[in-house]
Each structure stands twice: as structure tokens, then as C-alpha cells.
Amino acid sequence: MNPDPEKLYSMDKGLLDLRIDGIRQSLHRSRVALVAAIVVSATILTAIWNEYFTWDSIILDHEKLSGATVATLNDVKLQQWLKNYIDNWTISISLLGIRISGSDLSVFGCLALILFSLYWCICTRRTNHEIGSLFYELRNAEEVQRRMAYFGVRADLVFLPTTSDDSEFKNLARRGRTAGIDRVLRVMLYCLPFLPLIAAVTVLLSDVYFAAFYQVAGHRRWDEIPLAYRHRLVWCDSAGFVFSLLIWRFNRLTFRYTRGSATVLDAFRSKYANDFERTIDYNGEDCLKAK
């Protein structure tokens, strides 16, 4: 469906280039925010793994069962191993000169995830608004400008699927390409905005399980914690739960902005930017075919 030729207009080329460049910069900021969120989430998940799920933690529990304590561990290698084990679940931020223990991630880890989720959310929001406003304005523009805008923006997209077709090009004839969707790829792309939430929930569940339910020789860690520190643990996990709700909110908005941008791009391509496609005729010559 093409716009009415009588209503076509030409956007100033300088303005069009400026708008496309602005979208590209916005996409770049979104990718930087995505990478930052992935690094922070992976760091937190690694610290949780090193604290609770590695073989080092199992060996440490075994040493406790055998009656060994830090004071009685005279073996130099064993003490060095214990030091390395503790360092592995401590997050160091050299730029700020601070160290955060894995035991405090329910508060500080979730707080960091909130900040990065917020930044990622506002970056994708700006990208969505820039793409949506430009393509809405170009609905009745000249075909050359519509195609220029679409392909200029699409070239900078990495984590944003623009069509429902993930199949590869096998030759120069478009008719030789079989439409298909890679479901694993799509699921990974759709789950990326919720990675900070996954990290926050993992922190809270691990904290609760290993404090209240995990047993060593029939004894729970909860029973060994003094009453005052039990209250502190409850308050920290409660704060982490509230923080997780905020993370979920920002991640959900990020997902909606991302999917909205993809939908706008696909709708614009199918209606306004794909008026012609190149095909190979029966004589083997390249030609333009009107849709």
C-alpha cells in the first residue's frame, strides 16, 4: 500500500541525516547500557556461584564437619585456599576503592541492578521514541527517503529483530530464501531485558535457601545466627525484594520499548519501505519487480 502521491513531501536531507544519526547514537547508548547490565548481572551471578555452589564451599563445609576451624588450619596451603575462596565471592570495585561481600548482594547488588536497569530503560525509551516519531513523520514522504531512513537505521541494529524471518540468504534470488524463525535466538533476545531481574531473584533465593533451609550435619545456618543478625538478614532480604520489584518494572518497560521499536520497524518496512524487491527473471537477469 503506497501513500497518495498528491500528499508526498520531501523532508530536508540535512534534517533526515540528523534524525538518522540521532537514532544511531541512541542505539549505541542502548547497546552500551545492555553490555553494562550484562556485565553487572554476570558479576553478581558469579559471586553467588562462588559463595554457595562451587566445590570450594562443599570442601569448607567438610572441614567444619571434621572439626577444623580457621584457627586450627595451620597448613599454609589450606589457609591460602581459604583466603582465595573468600576473595572469589568478594566483588572489588577498584575505581571506587570499595569491596562488597557476596553476603551483602541482596542489598548492594540489587541496588546496582536498579541503577543499571533504569539507565538501560531510559536509553531504550529514547530509541523507541526517536524511531517511532521519525517513521511516523515519513509515512507520506518520498519513497527514496523512506527507504533511506529504514535502511539507514536497520544497519545499526544488533539486538533488535526487524522482521519475523531469521532464515539465511543462500543465493541472489530472494525466491530461494525459505522463511523461518529461529526460536532459540528469539527467546534469548526476548530474555535479555530481564537478565538483571534474573540476577536479583537468584541472589534472594540463594540467600534464603542457604540461610534458612540448607543443612550441614543436621544443623541449619539459621540456627547458628544470633537473634540480632537474624533480624538484619530479614530486613536485608526484604529490601532486596522491594528492589527486585523496581528492577522488574524497569526490565518490563525495557522489553516493551524494545519490542515496540521492532514492531514499528517491521510495520514501516512492510508498508512503506519495501515497495520494490529485486528478483531474478527466467533469463537470469536482475530486475526490479513492483510488489
Image (cartoon, helix red, strand yellow):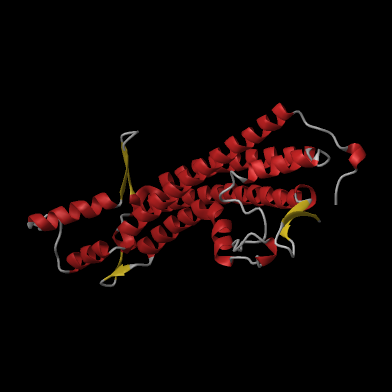
Q: Residue furthest front?
A: 283
Quarter of the figure with residue 58? bottom left
Q: Residue furthest right?
A: 6
- The foreground one among 259 and 288 is 288
Above or below for 74 versus 178:
above
Quarter of the figure with residue 54? bottom left
Q: Quadrant of the C terminus?
A: bottom right
- The foreground one among 19 and 279 is 279
Where is residue 159 shown, x and y percent of the image?
Answer: 56, 51
Residue 255 seen: yes
Q: Residue at x 52, y 51 (%)?
A: 244
Residue 118 seen: no
Residue 152 located left or right of residue 110: right
Above or below for 193 versus 283:
above
Where is residue 162 shown, x and y percent of the image?
Answer: 66, 53
Where is residue 19 shown, x and y percent of the image?
Answer: 68, 33
- The foreground one among 241 and 85 is 85
Residue 273 located left or right of residue 184: right
Residue 136 located left or right of residue 196: right
Q: How many marks?
A: 0
Q: Residue at x 74, y 65 (%)?
A: 282
Q: Residue at x 85, y 52 (%)?
A: 1
